[in-house]
Amino acid sequence: MSPDLWSLFESMLRCRLFEEVVAQLWRDGLISGEMHLGTGEEAIITGIIPQLRAGDALALDHRGTAALLLRGVDPVLILCELLGRPDGLCGGMGGHMHLFSRECLATSSGIVGAAGPAAVGFALAARYLRPGTLAVAFFGEGAMNQGMLLEALNLAAVWTMPVLFVCKDDGWSITTVSDHVTGGDLGVRARGLGVQAVEVDGRDVLQVWHAAEQAIARARAGQGPTFLRCRCVHLEGHFLGYPLLRATSDPLRELPPILGPLMRASVRPGGVGRQQRLKGLRQVMAPTTATLRDPRRQRGNDPVARTHDDLARIDPARLRELEAAVTRQVGEIVASAMQENAE
């Protein structure tokens, strides 16, 4: 199946605009708790979800909103759930990290790495109940250090299960550079467990599409699991209000409360030596200085912007019409959800 870039961009844009609405509702105080968005993952989600069939299953992580949206879950129900309302997708009890849809065979969890075992369970059921279907697991690269995910990869390989393991690798494990806490190469690790491993640019929707197409075909043909590593950039950091991004976007406001106590502690009499104190100070500040060099705000790392620019060179008028139509659609979704909320 040859992908249509216009349709892919429409799906990516719908995901982006929907999550921007969620972000604004969170900032307005209408959504409580932490909020983990998938902004920057749109090419990964859009390159995979539209290729799934009825009966295929999804095991999602704590950034499952866009995947459920593209899978056909009612977006008004999703918004109502995020608002904590009893008429939400999960009765207002799940929030954004624990979204479920029985009809779509989709589940999500805030437990890091839980998508792996859930996907293998779905795949086992598929083998006996829905031959020819498969399961997809979405997770971040930090989850590859969780034992249950490695066990799931191993079991999927041993039993030749129809699973696509999708690793959304943004290079950060919350506020720690992932390379500092992960040994070796993740593709080598997956292959060591007997799982075919493929790496793609997760900012390029066509690359993701073609890699996923082959992996899905392998799974349906009974040839076993694939580990698809997609490099991406989380534009909002690990969660909304990400402290490292706040520190770099507004350093005059954010850094003094952090640096002041650290500097005072480094010159206070007594305790360890000056060299050890300075070393500790450098270690504490390393994530912030790394974020100063982080490419989150570069346009080329935004999959929606990249695809927009490609299409603008082809037919700018058609692009404007498409963007206006998707903006209206998302606006209608929000209006419907907020009207029901007011009632």
Image: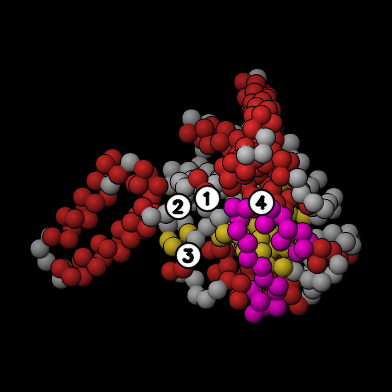
Q: Which residue is mark 4?
A: 205
The mark found on residue 178 in the picture is 3
Locate residue 233, reporting x and y percent: 52, 53
Q: Which residue is mark 1?
A: 301
The mark found on residue 11 in the picture is none
Mark 4 to mark 2 CA distance (whole Å) = 19 Å
Which residue is painted at 67% across and 57% down in the image? 207
Q: Are marks 2 and 1 in contact (CB under 8 Å)?
A: yes
Q: Earlier in the sequence, mark 4 or mark 2?
A: 4
Badge 4 marks a residue whose secondary structure is: helix
Q: Earlier in the sequence, mark 3 or mark 2?
A: 3
Indicate the quadrant where residue 225 lies. Answer: bottom right
Indicate the quadrant where residue 130 lies. Answer: bottom right
Mark 1 to mark 4 CA distance (whole Å) = 12 Å
Badge 3: how crowded within 10 Å, few (<14), some, or many (20+)?
A: some
Mark 3 to mark 1 CA distance (whole Å) = 18 Å
Badge 1 marks a residue whose secondary structure is: helix
Q: Earlier in the sequence, mark 3 or mark 1?
A: 3
Q: Earlier in the sequence, mark 2 or mark 1?
A: 2
